[in-house]
Image (cartoon, rainbow, N blue to C red):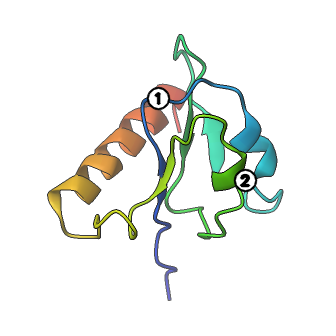
């Protein structure tokens, strides 16, 4: 049975500091730098995210959000937009 995708996402205010990437548990490794993004921003692979939230308090600009607490859930337009942003980021990385 497939695991439910995670709910955390990084918005466009990311400054590319990498704190979230370092916080993500090593075996999970759901956070990655978006290739060729001139700001060096990061994104979260929803399929790999385990919803631990360890990255959230470490972000100095509070750009990591939990879609569940913001009223964004699977099936709504906003959650679909997050999925589109993640697909764009993955396309940039060639994965």
Packing grade of label 1 (10 A; few <14, some 14-19, many >=20) is few
54 versus 9 height, above or below: below
- In the figure, is residue 80 to the left or right of 90? left
Q: Left of 21 or right of it: where is 51?
A: left
Identify the image quadrant of residue 51.
Answer: bottom right
Q: Residue at x 72, y 60 (%)?
A: 54
Disc 2, SS = loop
Res. 29 mark: 2
Which image quadrant is residue 12 in? top left
- Residue 73 is marked as none
Provide residue 82's location: percent of width, then percent of height. Answer: 33, 49
The x, y position of residue 77, in whole percent, is: 16, 56
Please name the residue shown 51% across and 40% down the image: 63
The secondary element bearing badge 1 is classed as loop
The label nearer to you, 2 versus 1, is 1
Does residue 68 appear to the left or right of 34 in the view shown? Answer: left
Q: Residue placed farthest to the top in the image?
A: 38
C-alpha separation, residue under disc 2 versus residue under disc 1: 21 Å
Q: Position of residue 64 (x, y in %)?
A: 53, 48
* Front residue of this view, candidates 42 and 4: 42
Check disc 1 and report the residue beneath it: 13
What residue sits 18% from the left and 64% below the top? Answer: 76
Where residue 89 appears, as percent x and y from the top left, is 45, 34
Q: Earlier in the sequence, mark 2 or mark 1?
A: 1
Q: Nearer the viewer, residue 84 or 68?
A: 68
Residue occupying image coordinates x 72% and y 47%: 58
In this rendering, the answer to whether 11 lies above or below 83 is above
Q: Is residue 72 above or below residue 15?
A: below
31 left or right of 81 in image = right
């Amino acid at each position: 049975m497939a695991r439910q995708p995670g709910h955390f996402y990084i918005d466009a205010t990311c400054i590319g500091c990498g704190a979230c990437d370092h916080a993500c548990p090593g075996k999970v490794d759901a956070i990655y730098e978006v290739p060729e993004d001139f700001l060096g921003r990061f994104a979260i692979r929803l399929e790999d995210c385990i919803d631990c939230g360890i990255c959230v308090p470490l972000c100095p600009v509070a750009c990591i959000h939990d879609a569940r607490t913001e009223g964004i859930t699977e099936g709504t337009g906003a959650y679909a937009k997050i999925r589109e942003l993640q697909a764009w980021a993955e396309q940039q990385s060639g994965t």
